[in-house]
Image (cartoon, rainbow, N blue to C red):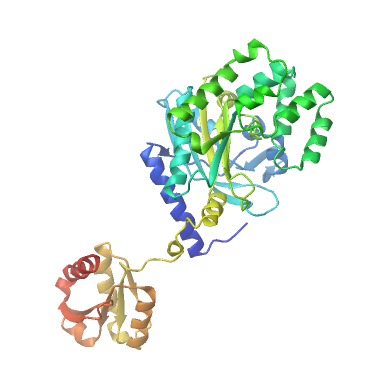
Amino acid sequence: MEDYYPPDFREIDWVIENIRDIADLYCYEEYETPPIEPIEIFAAKSSDELVNEQSFIVEKKEGERLILIPELTPSLARMVARKSQELKKPLRWFSVPTCFRYERPQKGRRRIFKQINFDILGEDNLYADLEIFNIIVDIFSLFGATSKQYQIYYNSREFMDALSNLILKIPKEKIPLVYKVLDKSDKLEDHEFEKYVYDSFENEFVVQGILKLKSVNSIKDLMKKFDSIPDKFYNSDGYKNLVNFEKLLSDANLSEYCTFSSSVVRGLDYYTGIVYEVYDTGKENIRSIFGGGRYDDLLSIFTDDLIPATGFGLGVLMLTLFLKTYDLIPEEIREKDYTDTIYIASINQDVSIYALKLANLVRREDFPCLVDYRFSNLKNQLSRANELGVLITLIIGPNEMEQNEVTIKNMKTEKQKVIKIEDLIEEIYNIIDEYED
């Protein structure tokens, strides 16, 4: 776990606030869930590895196990199911939860992290998935990233179900094992992956079929790898929907940002349709930046209502690493901007109450205000104002206090004058307008 000092926090906040702007453009509403949940809602549909190996478990009472949320989707499903009859679908929801993973900290991985979630619930057609892809591209474009720097690698669980069952003849109950194996394909060396496949499946035909699924970047090229493909496969919803989605991406001018990948299946058990992982195309960040997909059955553990859904969870840390790789975060973001701050410097402590009175007057007009409490050595106080990059400094002493006046100084032009306190706000605006011009 990690501390975030103000410069770090400003950087993270800048990333999140920019993405909030995208959420507003697409009319997504923000929500929040508790950071701790009953473990059952994650155990029901998430992967066994996530729940039992990578999560923080709390057992305050024997038999009552709670989990610090490792991701948000099951909590979202619970929340929507609770009011499924009241909520008008489709829902476009957005959240910035704090999540927890009990895993080895490394580049892009922390045990506590901010995540950004976009989800559409109650929309079962491919246009919802297309909108999510549009959002992803708009997020990267907002920060200045290009298709040469990242790609959305996509696949379909529905397509892989059909391929596994109709071409490889794998029983339905064993198909989840196919996903578990393929999800490891980019994490293992070729010989390690091949051994893992052989250890998982005894059938040579199945093993060879799964090895063919590793890293093929075209649906057409993937089909060429199999000698015999039944017509039933080409007529399956899995095949037709994936091909149709590929056409939608082309029609929406998103193809340059997206690449089919047969090995992308996502590790969580609840995915049902289009799935994807976003990767840096360079060599700096070798792990997935983030991913997501369609999860049409997840809400079934809470309600009998059929509520289709699709969305993604984006780790802010991984996105920030990507942006830094391509110098897409301005350095000045890490420094606080004091330009519009009014700085009050006092000649001595006798005017301290008058300084606070001025500060309250300025703050009531929504101007940030800093009072230097040293109340001595005016030169040092003005030097500090310059270091911060302040535009306007108010200087007060006994004479100003007695006459209900203030000396206002433009720190850029070094011009200063004495004015009545009732003219202060107008003069502040005049200096700011002159500076902006």
Residue 227 as seen in the image, left or right of residue 349: right
> Which residue is located at x 52 percent, y 64 percent?
5
Q: Nearer the viewer, residue 273 or 188?
A: 188
x and y percentages locating residue 385 in the rendered image:
35, 77
The total of numbered circles placed on residues is 0
x and y percentages locating residue 356 in the rendered image:
29, 74
Q: Nearer the viewer, residue 78 or 13?
A: 13
Establish if 203 lies above or below 16. above
Establish if 319 lies above or below 94. below
Establish if 252 lies above or below 332. above
> Which residue is located at x 52 percent, y 27 percent?
246
Task: State the quadrant of the C terminus.
Answer: bottom left
Work out whether residue 372 can be spotted.
no
x and y percentages locating residue 377 in the rendered image:
35, 89
Q: Nearer the viewer, residue 297 or 78?
A: 297
Work out whether residue 297 can be spotted.
yes
> Which residue is located at x 75 percent, y 19 percent?
170
Q: Residue furthest top?
A: 231
Establish if 127 lies above or below 23. above
Residue 278: quadrant of the picture: top right
x and y percentages locating residue 317 in the rendered image:
56, 52
Task: State the quadrant of the N terminus.
Answer: bottom right
Residue 135: quadrant of the picture: top left
Residue 417 as seen in the image, left or right of residue 87: left
